[in-house]
Image: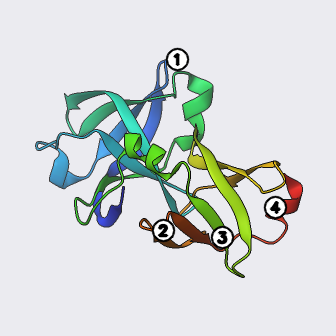
Amino acid sequence: MSYNTGILLGRIAKVQGYEGAVTIRLEKTFTDNIPEMESVFLEIEGKPVPFLISESDHRGAGILRLEFKGYDSFEKINEFTGCRVFLKSGKGKEIQHNDLSFFVGFKVISEDKSLAGTIREIIENPGQWLINIETAKGKEILIPFHEDFIIKIDRKKKIIKMDLPEGLMEIN
């Protein structure tokens, strides 16, 4: 999924209830015209993080109530109060939520062209995706599957070239 910083839906004003719902104060452009959405991006620490929507309710008066999949309690969602909410850009070819399993079996190569391992599993973690890599020695390593680490994806050769942070392979 990609997002566009020019399509600001609004800002999370508060958590509503104890089931993990949030109230979004909409930008003026969207007060009467709410687009149909399956997901949005929350800006967390300056970076876009995708969230899938499980329930949406337009309350009028520039207020939208959203519930996110996997966030079903006050404790899980409270830290996102004040975050800006962006819409998907709709441009380019997007990787959908269910399509990430496509990468299972891909080889991961670090920037210095050494083989890190083979992707065995894609794990959905709150706030980010992780890839479970099995090294040639049979060791499992978890790496954030984030666009900042990805240099190149070669779908034909089933290779993902990544710029991995120093020491990441050793701490796993």
Residue at 42% in and 67% down: 156
Per the image, label 2 sits on a secondary structure element best described as loop
Q: Earlier in the sequence, mark 4 or mark 1?
A: 1
Of marks 4 and 3, the one in the foreground: 3
Q: Which mark is residue 169?
A: 4
Q: CA distance from mark 4 to mark 3?
A: 12 Å
Q: Is residue 30 left or right of residue 96?
A: left
The residue that label 1 is drawn on is: 18
The residue carrying mark 3 is: 109
Q: Nearer the viewer, residue 101 or 68?
A: 101
Q: Residue furthest top?
A: 18
Residue 5 in picture, x, y percent from top left: 34, 66
Nearer mark to the viewer, of 1 and 2: 2
Could you say which is closer to the camera, residue 46 or residue 172?
172
| Callout 2 amino acid | Lys
Residue 21, how many percent across, how many down?
A: 43, 26
Assign the N terminus to one quadrant of the image: bottom left
Front residue of 148 and 98: 98
* Element marked by disc 1: loop
Q: Secondary structure at mark 4?
A: helix
Amino acid tagged 3? Ile
Name the one closer to the observer, 45 or 104.
104
Q: Are marks 1 and 2 in contact (CB under 8 Å)?
A: no
Task: Work out whether residue 148 can be spotted.
Answer: no
* Residue 30 locus on image (x, y percent): 18, 48
Q: CA distance from mark 2 to mark 3?
A: 12 Å
Vertical arrangement, residue 105 with respect to residue 7, above or below: above
Q: Position of residue 135 (x, y in %)?
A: 77, 55
Q: Earlier in the sequence, mark 2 or mark 4?
A: 2
Precedes in sequence: disc 4 or disc 3: 3
- Cα–Cα span, label 4 and label 1: 39 Å
Residue that label 2 marks? 157
